[in-house]
Amino acid sequence: TLDEFEGYTMEKDENERETGIPYSLRLRVTDATDFDDGRELQIHTRMSEEYLDLQRGMPVCAVLLSTSQKFQSLAAITDFCIPDAGPCWVGDYPYLDRPALEQLLVEDEELWDSFREEGRYFYI
């Protein structure tokens, strides 16, 4: 869990100070509400104080890449957004135009409603 990182900041990263390598975070993202079913992808990124509020079960918005038109297999994931945590963006490099994606989510009523239903909080 992230509890052990309470008070963490990138500027005071103990691991980086001692070893020269910053703490890393590995997150597992599944495409099912039952964590034992469905496909999963993992993303690795440098630890950041932005990630301290992440909790298991929060809905995620991501751009998935696949070599299959039916997405039977997943090839890659770019950075992704977790609306319930801010929104919080996770990923080492911003491949997506984040403000444009946030605007798209807000303007697409059906998509935005599905996020509100899956999420824990109500969005204005």
Image: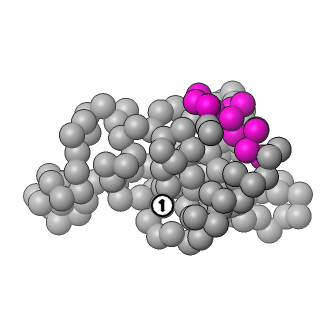
Which one is in front, 45 or 55?
55
Does dot 1 land on a helix, a strand or a loop? loop
Colouring of the image: one colour
Residue 31 at x, y = what percent? 71, 42
- Tell me: 114 left or right of 27: right
Where does the C terminus fall, quadrant-wise?
top right
- Above or below 30: residue 97: below
* Residue 59, visible in the rendered structure: no
Residue 56 at x, y = what percent? 52, 32
Q: Residue furthest right?
A: 70
Where does the N terminus fall, quadrant-wise?
top left
- Above or below 46: residue 117: above
* Amino acid on which the number 1 mark rests in the picture: Gly
Magenta region, residue range: 111-122
- Above or below 10: residue 39: above
* Residue 58, visible in the rendered structure: yes
Decide whether residue 61 is among the magenta residues. Answer: no
Q: Residue furthest left?
A: 18
- Tell me: 114 left or right of 25: right
Decide whether residue 116 is among the magenta residues. Answer: yes
- Tell me: 28 left or right of 5: right
Q: Badge 1 is on which residue?
A: 91
